[in-house]
Structure formats: structure tokens, C-alpha cells
Amino acid sequence: MNKKITIAIDGFSSTGKSTIAKLIANKYNYIYVDTGAMYRAVTLFAKNNGFVEQDSLDRESLIANLPNISLRFQFNENLGFAEMFLNNENVEKEIRTLEISQLVSKIAAISEVRKKLVAEQQEMGKNGGIVMDGRDIGTVVFPDAELKLFMTASSGKRATRRYNELIDKGDVVSYEDILFNVQERDRIDSTRDDSPLVKAFDAIEIDNSDLGIQEQFDKISELINQKNR
């Protein structure tokens, strides 16, 4: 390949953004950044410090403590991807629970949180050769990205994927709770005032309701190859 481009992958929750992004990053030897993990880590910090619960949010206390939050990714050779560290502690497992999923949209809607994380994300990708997924990558973080993708799927298909993923990990969850969480996150992410989830005007939409991982991988690989011809 002649150059390393910036690939921005946005879309709804549980559309497999991180899965496909990891595969693409591995194929092209790109840096992969899971921005969702960053918001989840801040959410975990807020929960552990009593700043957020299901029915309450102490915005002011969290904002005041943002300077005390240090985030970094550390590559795990055994897993083949980078894990999330919060204040030098590996929190990869803790941030993937349903409880954090139910709280993260509240935290992601706080402008001061988004400002802090967007600045960190832009610094990570300033030299290109990066695959980044999230909710506002193509619209806010990298509006000039050479390739923008927008992943979508029916809420039912996404809930089923998330349910199976958590069950495989040994979590005790119900499909109804997962479906509600998916739909509620869609609502909050799409209607928040700061950087709502929207498809960038120049993004390519991929509905993977009925597409397997290999089909998505092949389609996106061809799009990347077209950018480098």
C-alpha cells in the first residue's frame, strides 16, 4: 500500500464495529482504537466513585475529577488486541458488563467528557494509519478521514448478538434487558445535544443484519484497496 489512511467507523451499539475494526487493523498493520472502551472506562470510574447510578448522575463531581482519569491502551499479544487501562489498572473485563452498558450513554453525553476524549483520540490518529470506531469518529474526531463507514443492523439482531456474547462469557442476563438497553442507547446516542450519533454525509453505510464477519471484512477491504489505487 502506498499510504496509510485514516478509517473512521461509526454506528449503533452492538453492530460489530470493534470486531471488524480489529480485523482490518490486523490486515493492514494499522493502529486500532476502540473509543467505546474509553467512554466505558470513564463510566467505570464514575460508578466506582459514586458519581453515576441508574437513576442519578453527579455531573459536577465527575467533571471536577476528569484530570484524575488516565486512560491508555496496552497491546496483549495473547489476545491479539489492546486492552483498556484506567489509572494503570487493566479494566478490560469490568467495562464490558451490562451494568456499564446501561450507564455509558449518560457519561458520553457530558460535553466535558467528550472534549477530553476527543482530544486524546485526535492525538492518537494524527499520523494516519489508524482504524477508530465509535459514535462521532467521522463527524467530529476525524471529519477529514479518507474512509468513513457507518454500521447499522436491526435492534433485534444486535440484541441477539450482545446476548450471546454475554452468555458465552458466563454472565447471567435476559434477552429482554439486552434489547431494552440496545434501544435505549440508540435513543440517547441519537438525541444527545453534544455530538449525536449521525451518519456523516460522505460515509458508506453497511447494514450487517444479514452479513457475516467475512462478508463485511471482504467488502471493507475492497473499499480500502480502492482508496489506495
Image (cartoon, rainbow, N blue to C red):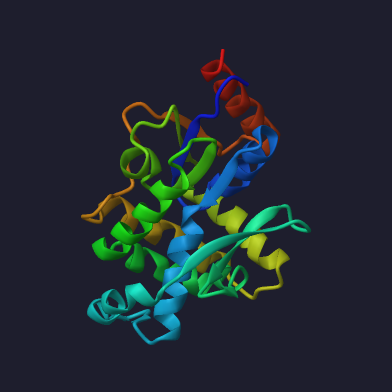
Of residue 69 and residue 191, the one placed in the foreground of this image is 69
Q: Considering only vertical position in the picture, is 29 above or below 32?
A: above
Image spot of residue 26 (x, y percent) = 68, 40
From what the image shows, is residue 101 above or below residue 172? above
Camera-side residue of 206 and 154: 206
Side of 158 where 82 appears, left or right:
right
| Image height of 152 relative to 45, above or below | above
* Horizontal arrangement in the rendering, residue 75 relative to residue 8 (left or right): right
Q: Number of numbered discs present?
A: 0
Residue 101, position in %: x, y? 48, 67
Residue 8: x, y in percent? Answer: 45, 38
Quadrant position of residue 75:
bottom right
The residue lying at 55 percent from left, 18 percent from top is 228
Instruction: Give the percent coordinates (x, y) of residue 83.
Output: 62, 62
The answer to whether residue 106 is left or right of residue 218 is left
Q: Residue furthest top?
A: 229
Q: Residue furthest bottom?
A: 50
Report if residue 16 is visible in the image.
no
Foreground pick, 23 / 160: 23
Can I make out residue 173 in this image? yes
Quadrant in the picture for residue 184 = bottom left
> Residue at coordinates 38% horizontally, 87% vertically from top-left?
50
Residue found at the far right of this picture? 78
